[in-house]
Structures are given as C-alpha cells and as structure tokens.
Amino acid sequence: MSGDQILSVDSLSMRFGGIVAVNELSFNAERRKITALIGPNGAGKTTVFNCITGFYKPTSGAMRLAHDNGHAIQLEQLNDFRISKLAKVARTFQNIRLFPGMTVLENLMVAQHNALMRASGLTFLGLIGAPSWRKAEEAAIDLARTWLDRIGLLDRADDAAGNLPYGDQRRLEIARAMCTQPALLCLDEPAAGLNARESAALSELLLSIRANQGTSILLIEHDMSVVMEISDHIVVMDHGLKIAEGTPREIRDDPKVIAAYLGTD
Ligand code: ATP
C-alpha cells in the first residue's frame, strides 16, 4: 500500500448462491479524502461495505487497511468487532440505528463504551485509581459534547434521540461514529430521506470532518448533488463490477456511467 492510501480493496468478490453481488472489485481510498461508491440499485455497494466492516466474509479477495503503526491490517481475516476496535473502522447504516429511547448524549457515550470499559476494568483491577476512571469519563463526556456542538445539538443533549427531527438523527449517527475516533468512516446513504436544507447541512458536516479531523471517508450515496459536491474520488459499480472511477467531473461525463444509470446497457 502506498503511504497515501487508507484502504486497498483487491479483487473482492462476494457471491450469494448463484448471485455475484460483487465481482473482482478493486479500488483504493486515500487518507483524508472522501471516496464515494455509487451505482444503480443492486449494484453491490452495501455488500462491499458489509465485507469491509466484517459483516460478511468475502468469497475471495483482499482488503487492507493502513494502521497508524505503519502496518496493513488484512480486514478479511477479522470479524466485525475486531475491525471496529483494532482497525478503527466505523460505519452507519442505510436505516437509522440510534437508541431512540436513550438521550442524545447517551447515544454518544455508548459509542465510547470500549474506552470506558477499559478504564473501568483497570480501576477494578487496581491498576488505575478512581480519579483516573473519573478522568476517562469526563473525557468521554467532553468529546460527546464537542460533537453535539459541532452538529448544533448541544441544547438537545438530554432529549430522547428518537424525538429529534430525521435530519438531526442522521447527523447524530455520524457524530456517534466520530466519537470512536475512526481511521475510516463508512457512511451508507447518509442523505437518504433528507430535504435540501438537511442535505446541505450533511455535506457541510462531512467537509468539516475531512478538513478538521482529517478522517478518511467512504461514502455510498444516491444523492448526486451531495456526491458531486464533496467527493474527491468516485468509484462506480454496476451489477457487481467496477465500471468507472475518477473525479466528479470525469464521472459526470462518462458515457458508461450515464448508460448504467439510464438502464441502457
Ligand atoms: P442499493 O443501492 O439498492 O442499496 P446496493 O448497490 O447497495 O443497492 P447490495 O445491497 O449490495 O446493492 O445488493 C447487491 C446484490 O446482492 C443484490 O442483487 C442483492 O439482492 C444481493 N444481496 C445482498 N445481500 C444479500 C444476501 N444477504 N443474500 C442474498 N443476496 C444478497
């Protein structure tokens, strides 16, 4: 992997019985960039996410994630828990998966469960004192409140997450993923169901995450105005195959892409 790459997908295939959902797909995602994975319904995009995040074991192929320590982590050899914990890959889903009955703040605290459990275990074992545990908890609350401020929901911290407007819930999910301080953030159709104002707020949030946190983002999205506005690189899939990749301008003008979306292939 080159030093600029965060993710390298090499000849990835995923079959379900006779269906080839992903067919020998190869692409790279660069660090601190937004890479979009687009394509018509059923192209195989979510299946790629499910392979990268360990929800599916791919039929064949390799997926390598660059770790902070300079080594590459072979994602296909890990389960979903280890991919989120060791490889620091966070994801959101097509349908919102917040805890609706918990408060907005609690949803962000749950994301930091691993760090808090570690501090709690060390306290229990007598390896760190109660003040250190309290420090870990305060740091988690600070991080959660920082993200609530970033998405304009600090004043809703104590409200039930399920009572937020839909667009706010979408951005809360992204804030929750960011509380895990991921190396790679995978977003599955974050603009689905948003109105124009909410989509603009989403684009602004993702651009600010790239600029301020330098987080590498992999984005599945059908809203082409969002994709074209914020992506650095676009990979286009159709029927499990990569049919094109390039900058937004290159993709917009590509006849293969136009044909795939118009269904004339
Ligand atoms: P959309 O944009 O509609 O979300 P997509 O590009 O994300 O589509 P996938 O959801 O990855 O496409 O589906 C690709 C193909 O794989 C489809 O034919 C789908 O029916 C099939 N598929 C996905 N998951 C499974 C599964 N668990 N079992 C069987 N077939 C599956």
Image: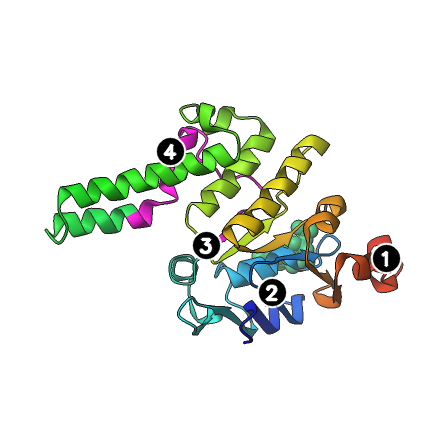
Circles 3, 4 touching at the beta carbon (< 8 Å): no
Which quarter is ligand 1 in?
Answer: bottom right
Q: Earlier in the sequence, mark 4 or mark 1?
A: 4
Which labelled disc corresponds to residue 182? 3
Which residue type carries mark 2? Ala
Task: From the image, tell me which residue sits under label 2.
Answer: 29
Circles 2, 1 touching at the beta carbon (< 8 Å): no
Q: Quadrant of the C terminus?
A: bottom right
Q: Residues within 10 Å of mark 2 (few under 14, many from 20)?
A: many
Where is residue 212? Give x, y as percent.
Answer: 53, 48
Q: Quadrant of the N terminus?
A: bottom right
Which quadrant holds residue 15? bottom right
Q: Of helix, strand and loop, which one carries label 3?
A: loop
Which residue type carries mark 4? Glu
Which labelled disc corresponds to residue 106? 4
Q: CA distance from mark 2 to mark 4?
A: 32 Å
Q: CA distance from mark 3 to mark 4?
A: 19 Å
Circles 2, 4 touching at the beta carbon (< 8 Å): no
Q: Residues within 10 Å of mark 1 (few under 14, many from 20)?
A: some
Q: Residues within 10 Å of mark 3 (few under 14, many from 20)?
A: many
Circles 4, 1 touching at the beta carbon (< 8 Å): no
Which labelled disc corresponds to residue 36? none
Where is residue 18? Give x, y as percent.
Answer: 66, 68
Where is residue 133? Give x, y as percent.
Answer: 20, 43
Q: Earlier in the sequence, mark 3 or mark 2?
A: 2
- Is label 1 within 8 A of ligand 1 (CB to nearest ligand atom)? no
Which residue type carries mark 3? Pro
Q: Of helix, strand and loop, which one carries label 4?
A: helix
Residue depicted at x 56% and y 63%:
31
Q: Which residues are magenta?
A: 90-115
Residue depicted at x 69% and y 31%:
197
